[in-house]
Image (cartoon, rainbow, N blue to C red):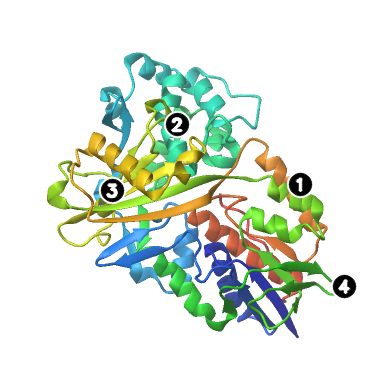
C-alpha cells in the first residue's frame, strides 16, 4: 500500500510535520509519497537568518525556551543537539522604559520591592493580588485580567510591554486563556499568581528544577540552521516557488494545483501549514464555513529594523536582553533586542547587533513607513535610550505585513467551530501558529500531533495515538 500526502507551506510547521511523517512512516510497512509545496523561493517563512560578514540577523523569532520539551525533541530528532546555542547570562536582565529611562524588570520579590519600575502605590496594589477572587468569565482579555488581579499600573508597565514583546498585540483585545494559557491555569489551579508562585517554589525544592521559566535557546548560525536541516532531510520532496492555486475535494481525497507542478496531483490527505488567510482562500470552494472562520483570524503587522554599530560607538553596556516600550510612553517602537549580547555568534568582534520592532496592533501604520523614515525613527529612539549618536554601519529591514496572529477573545470558540468543520472534511488538516501557540515550541508540538493524526487517518498500523497537547 502507498498513500500520498501534500503539505502546503514550508515554514517550520510544515517542515516539522513532514519530517515527523517520514520518521513515523519509516517505522511501518506502508509507503508514503510526500510533497511539500512552498509559494516562496525559500523555505522557513519568517523563521530565517541572514548571515553576512560575521553577522547573524534574524528575520523574526530568535529562539525558544528550553523549559518545554518540544523544540528540543525536534532538534534531537534531526541530530542538532551539538548545534544548540544557549543565551548568555545577560538574557536574564530585561528592561522596561518608563518616562524615557530604562528600568530593570525585577526578577525576585526583593528586587520587586526595591525596583523603581512601579510606584509605591503600584507595588502595594500588586501585593494585594492574593486577596483577589478568581473571575467568573473564562475568556477575559489580558487587560481585564491584569487590572483585576494586579492593578492598572502593573497593566501599563508589566503586562502591556510583555504582550508587545510576544504578540505585538493589544492587551485590551487578546484573550488571556488563548494567548497565555499558563497564566490562566495558575489562577484556575492555585487561586492566584502569588499562591501559584509559592506552591511551585515548594514543589521545585522537593523535586528539582521546575516552573514556566527556562533558558532562551537558539542554534549556531541562527534559526535558519533548523530550517536548513529539516529541508535537507526532505530533499526533493519540497517544491519551492510553487503557490497552490486550487484545492479541490474529490471522491478519493483531494486534487492540488500549482504552477510549480507539471500538472494537478491527487492526494489522500492535505495539511494546510500556511497562514490562516491562505488556508481560508484554499478552503473557500469546498468548505466555506471553515474558510470564514480562518479568514476571521487577525494578524498584526511587524517590521524589524536591525542595526549594526561599532562597539566603541555604543555608550550603553548592553548588559541585558533588551528593552520593551509600554504604550503609555508614546514612542514609535515596541522595543529593541540586544542580540549580540544574548547570543555569542550574532556579531563579529568589536561590533554589536540590535533589532528593533515597529508596528504591531498598537500602531500598524508605523510598520508600513518607508525605509528612510523607519530607520530615522529607530535611530532617534536608540539615541534617546542607549545614547547612540553615530550612524549604524549596517542596516537590515524585514517587513512582515501579516506578522503575528492575534488570539483575540473568542479565539478558543473559533477553534472549536473550526475543529467541527475540519471533521466534516476528512483528510484535511491544519497546522500553523495561527491556532494553538505562536512560538517554536508550539509549532514543534503541533507538527508532531498533526503528523500522528494524518497517519492515523490513513490507517498506518504503527501510527501512535494522538499525543495530548502539553501546552
Mark before the other along the chain sequence, 3 or 4? 4
Mark before the other along the chain sequence, 1 or 2? 2
Q: Secondary structure at mark 3?
A: loop
Q: CA distance from mark 3 to mark 4?
A: 54 Å
The residue carrying mark 3 is 338
Are circles 1 and 4 on residues that touch, CB within 8 Å?
no
Could you tell me which residue is drawn at 33 percent across and 33 percent down?
96
Could you tell me which residue is drawn at 42 percent across and 74 percent down?
79
The residue carrying mark 1 is 417
Q: CA distance from mark 2 to mark 4?
A: 50 Å
- Mark 3, other Cα within 10 Å: few <14 / some 14–19 / many ≥20: many
The residue carrying mark 4 is 251
In this view of the protein, can residue 108 be seen by the observer? no
Location of residue 440 in the rendering, given as x and y in whole percent from the top left corner? 49, 56
Q: Quadrant of the N terminus?
A: bottom right
Are circles 1 and 2 on residues that touch, CB within 8 Å?
no
Mark before the other along the chain sequence, 1 or 3? 3
Mark before the other along the chain sequence, 2 or 4? 2
Above or below, comparing residue 368 to residue 198 in the picture = below
The residue carrying mark 2 is 159
- Mark 4, other Cα within 10 Å: few <14 / some 14–19 / many ≥20: few
Q: CA distance from mark 1 to mark 4?
A: 24 Å
Q: CA distance from mark 1 to mark 2?
A: 30 Å
Q: Secondary structure at mark 1?
A: helix
Above or below, comparing residue 451 to residue 386 in the picture = below
Q: Depth-wise, is mark 1 or mark 3 nearer the camera?
A: 3
Q: Secondary structure at mark 2?
A: helix
Are circles 2 and 3 on residues that touch, CB within 8 Å?
no
Q: CA distance from mark 1 to mark 3?
A: 41 Å
Amino acid at each position: 500500500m502507498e498513500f500520498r500526502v501534500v503539505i502546503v507551506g514550508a515554514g517550520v510547521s510544515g517542515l516539522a510535520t513532514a519530517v515527523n511523517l517520514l520518521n513515523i512512516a519509516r517505522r511501518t510497512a506502508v509507503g508514503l509519497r510526500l510533497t511539500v509545496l512552498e509559494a516562496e523561493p525559500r523555505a522557513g517563512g519568517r523563521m530565517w537568518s541572514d548571515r553576512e560578514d560575521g553577522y547573524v540577523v534574524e528575520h523574526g523569532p530568535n529562539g525558544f525556551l528550553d523549559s518545554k520539551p518540544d523544540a528540543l525533541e525536534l532538534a534531537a530528532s534531526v541530530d542538532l543537539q551539538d548545534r544548540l546555542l544557549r543565551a548568555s547570562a545577560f538574557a536574564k536582565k530585561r528592561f522596561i522604559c518608563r518616562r524615557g529611562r530604562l528600568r530593570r524588570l525585577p526578577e525576585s520579590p526583593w528586587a520587586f520591592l526595591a525596583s523603581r519600575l512601579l510606584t509605591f502605590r503600584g507595588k502595594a496594589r500588586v501585593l494585594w493580588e492574593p486577596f483577589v477572587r478568581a473571575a467568573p468569565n473564562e475568556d477575559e482579555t489580558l487587560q481585564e485580567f491584569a487590572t483585576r488581579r494586579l492593578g492598572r499600573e502593573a497593566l501599563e508597565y508589566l503586562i502591556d510591554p510583555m504582550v508587545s514583546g510576544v504578540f505585538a498585540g493589544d492587551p485590551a483585545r487578546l484573550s488571556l486563556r488563548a494567548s497565555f494559557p499558563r497564566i490562566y491555569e495558575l489562577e484556575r489551579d492555585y487561586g492566584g499568581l502569588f499562591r501559584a508562585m509559592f506552591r511551585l517554589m515548594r514543589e521545585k525544592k522537593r523535586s528539582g528544577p521546575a516552573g514556566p521559566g527556562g533558558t532562551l535557546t537558539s542554534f549556531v548560525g541562527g534559526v535558519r540552521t533548523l530550517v536548513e536541516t529539516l529541508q535537507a532531510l526532505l530533499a526533493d520532496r519540497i517544491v519551492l516557488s510553487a503557490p497552490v492555486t486550487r484545492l479541490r475535494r474529490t471522491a478519493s481525497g483531494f486534487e492540488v494545483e500549482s504552477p510549480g507542478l507539471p500538472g494537478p496531483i491527487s492526494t489522500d490527505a492535505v495539511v494546510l501549514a500556511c497562514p490562516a488567510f491562505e488556508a481560508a482562500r484554499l478552503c473557500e470552494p469546498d468548505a466555506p464555513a471553515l474558510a470564514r472562520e480562518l479568514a476571521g483570524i487577525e494578524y498584526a503587522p511587524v517590521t524589524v529594523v536591525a542595526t549594526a554599530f561599532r562597539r566603541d560607538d555604543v555608550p550603553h553596556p548592553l548588559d541585558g536582553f533588551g528593552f520593551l516600550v509600554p504604550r503609555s510612553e508614546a514612542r514609535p517602537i515596541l522595543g529593541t533586542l540586544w542580540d549580540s549580547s544574548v547570543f555569542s555568534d550574532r556579531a563579529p568582534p568589536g561590533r554589536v547587533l540590535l533589532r528593533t520592532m515597529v508596528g504591531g496592533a498598537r500602531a500598524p501604520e508605523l510598520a508600513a513607513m518607508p525605509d528612510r523614515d523607519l530607520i530615522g525613527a529607530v535611530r532617534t529612539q536608540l539615541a534617546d535610550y542607549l545614547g547612540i549618536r553615530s550612524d549604524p554601519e549596517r542596516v537590515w529591514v524585514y517587513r512582515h505585513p501579516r506578522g503575528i496572529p492575534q488570539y483575540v477573545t473568542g479565539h478558543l470558540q473559533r477553534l472549536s467551530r473550526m475543529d467541527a468543520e475540519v471533521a466534516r472534511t476528512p483528510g484535511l488538516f491544519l497546522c500553523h501558529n495561527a491556532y494553538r501557540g505562536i512560538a517554536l515550541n508550539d509549532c514543534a508540538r503541533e507538527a508532531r500531533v498533526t503528523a500522528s493524526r494524518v497517519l492515523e487517518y490513513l490507517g498506518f498500523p504503527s501510527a501512535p495515538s494522538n499525543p495530548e497537547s502539553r501546552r
